[in-house]
């Protein structure tokens, strides 16, 4: 067993898990902060003068924090007309942690596979290893920036962040595909010996 090829994947994977684990405090703190609360919207419905509920149409939504009841902020409209408007900043925090941990585990698995399967091609193993590192670093960036920008009330540049996320996802997909090929080549070489 020689992990010299995949040791960076294992180290980066554990570092990502630790970094995003330490952000759990800030993610959970959002439930008590004003700007992270779910809001409610008062829905204005046009009944079109008929008792049939199927032809009713929503014509306006009035959002806004006025007072808080059970974790939701309400405006001073008729209470039965409220619908929940979820907060994207808090959801970005949960997504940030989930995607980072999943991709870190993928990265660790790829590191172990390319380290153990020394019978496979060296270039293929190196590409799988580096693509996995790129994927684990790039994929959670969009949610990380969205979460922290909301924390400091700054708008996130989504035109830059979405392509970075797509590149990170594609890199991890290719790394997993290459790791599968490396695994199959390594087991074929071991069986041949």
Image (tube, rainbow, N blue to C red):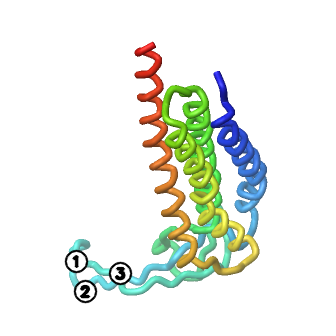
Q: Which residue is mark 1?
A: 55
Is residue 19 left or right of 174 when viewed as pictured?
right
Please tell me whether mark 2 sits on a helix, a strand or a loop. Answer: loop
Crowd class of label 2 (few under 14; some 14 to 19; many from 20; radius 10 Å)? few
At 70% across and 60% down in the image, what residue appears? Answer: 31
Please determine whether, in this image, residue 59 is positioned above or below residue 28.
below
Can you say which quadrant of the picture contains the N terminus? Answer: top right
At 48% across and 63% down in the image, what residue appears? Answer: 166
Whole-Å distance between the Cαs marked 2 and 1? 7 Å
Can you say which quadrant of the picture contains the C terminus? Answer: top left
**Residue 37 seen in the current view:** no
**Residue 71 seen in the current view:** yes
Crowd class of label 3 (few under 14; some 14 to 19; many from 20; radius 10 Å)? few
Front tag of 2 and 3:
3
In percent of width and height, residue 60 lies at 42, 86
In percent of width and height, residue 18 lies at 75, 45
At 25% across and 86% down in the image, what residue appears? Answer: 48
Number of the label disc, if any, that sits on residue 58: 3
Q: Earlier in the sequence, mark 2 or mark 1?
A: 2
In percent of width and height, residue 82 lies at 49, 72
Whole-Å distance between the Cαs marked 3 and 1? 10 Å
Please tell me whether mark 1 sits on a helix, a strand or a loop. Answer: helix
Crowd class of label 1 (few under 14; some 14 to 19; many from 20; radius 10 Å)? few
Of 165 and 129, the residue lying toward us:
129
Number of the label disc, if any, that sits on residue 48: 2
């Amino acid at each position: 067993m020689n992990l010299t090829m995949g040791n960076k994947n294992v180290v980066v994977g554990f570092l990502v898990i630790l970094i995003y684990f330490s952000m759990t405090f800030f993610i959970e703190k959002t439930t008590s902060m004003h700007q992270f609360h779910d809001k409610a919207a008062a829905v204005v419905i046009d009944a079109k003068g008929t008792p049939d509920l199927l032809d009713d149409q929503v014509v306006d939504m009035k959002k806004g924090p006025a007072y808080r009841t059970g974790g939701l902020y309400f405006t001073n409209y008729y209470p039965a007309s409220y619908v929940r408007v979820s907060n994207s900043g808090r959801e970005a925090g949960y997504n940030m942690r989930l995607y980072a941990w999943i991709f870190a585990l993928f990265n660790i698995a790829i590191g172990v596979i390319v380290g153990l399967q020394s019978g496979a091609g060296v270039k293929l193993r190196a590409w799988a290893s580096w693509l996995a590192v790129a994927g684990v670093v790039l994929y959670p960036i969009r949610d990380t920036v969205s979460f922290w920008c909301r924390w400091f009330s700054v708008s996130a540049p989504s035109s830059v962040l979405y392509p970075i996320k797509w590149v990170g996802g594609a890199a991890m997909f290719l790394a997993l595909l290459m790791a599968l090929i490396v695994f199959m080549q390594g087991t074929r070489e071991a069986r041949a010996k």
